[in-house]
Image (cartoon, rainbow, N blue to C red):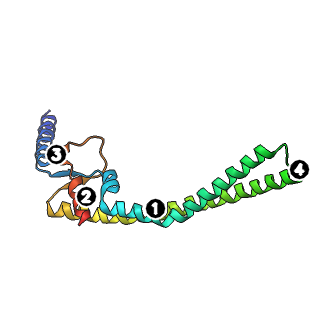
Amino acid sequence: MATRWLKAYLAVFLLLASHQAMADMKIGFVNTERVFREAPIAIAAQKRLEKEFAPRDAELQKMAKQARDLQSQLEKGSATLSDNDRRSKERDLANLNREYQRLLREFREDLNVRRNEELTKVQDRARKAIQSYGESEKYDVILEDAIYFSPKIDITDHIIHMLAQ
């Protein structure tokens, strides 16, 4: 019986001690999605990707227009075209579509690789900024993902500001 009371007192003591320790903790929250969307280094990375892939995107747009034009010619002139001309245009359209699909696949793969490279750079810089801010402001813990957080612990603006410098 005495050990049961001792265990109960010990449990209450530990609960109160852990509650006091939690009350003294300094907790922060960083909305990383917002950092990746609004931080100047993230915006610059996005602009670099757009500039790097713009020529290939323009080429794909041009190729898609050629395919649409060729399809339109086939539909409009199907009654007046000879069988050989029609088959030739259909073959050209099929080849153009295959080439377009191949180039589009390569474009997407290359874009994803480069996007991941740029995102990794931004993530590394953001993590260093978060860690530096946490150490300088004496935070016990800084969270990145949360179902709910109070705006009073949100330090996202501070991190975005640090990344702007």
Measure the alpha-carbon separation of dots 3 and 4. Answer: 75 Å
Measure the alpha-carbon separation of dots 1 and 3. Answer: 36 Å
Q: Which residue is mark 1?
A: 50
For badge 1, the amino acid type reads Glu
For badge 2, the amino acid type reads Ile
Please give left or right for residue 61 compared with residue 17 in the image: right
Asked if disc 2 and disc 3 are in contact, CB closer than 8 Å, the reply is no
Q: Which dot, 1 or 3, sits closer to the camera?
A: 1
Q: Which residue is mark 4?
A: 82
Measure the alpha-carbon separation of dots 1 and 4. Answer: 44 Å
Q: Residue at x 22, y 60 (%)?
A: 161
Asked if disc 1 and disc 3 are in contact, CB closer than 8 Å, the reply is no
Asked if disc 2 and disc 1 are in contact, CB closer than 8 Å, the reply is no
Q: Residue at x 89, y 50 (%)?
A: 83
Q: Nearer the viewer, residue 77 or 132?
A: 77
Q: Which residue is mark 3?
A: 152
Dividing the picture into quadrants, the one containing residue 85 is bottom right
Q: Which residue is mark 2?
A: 160
Please give left or right for residue 136 compared with residue 79 in the image: left
Q: Nearer the viewer, residue 76 or 122?
A: 76
Asked if disc 3 and disc 4 are in contact, CB closer than 8 Å, the reply is no
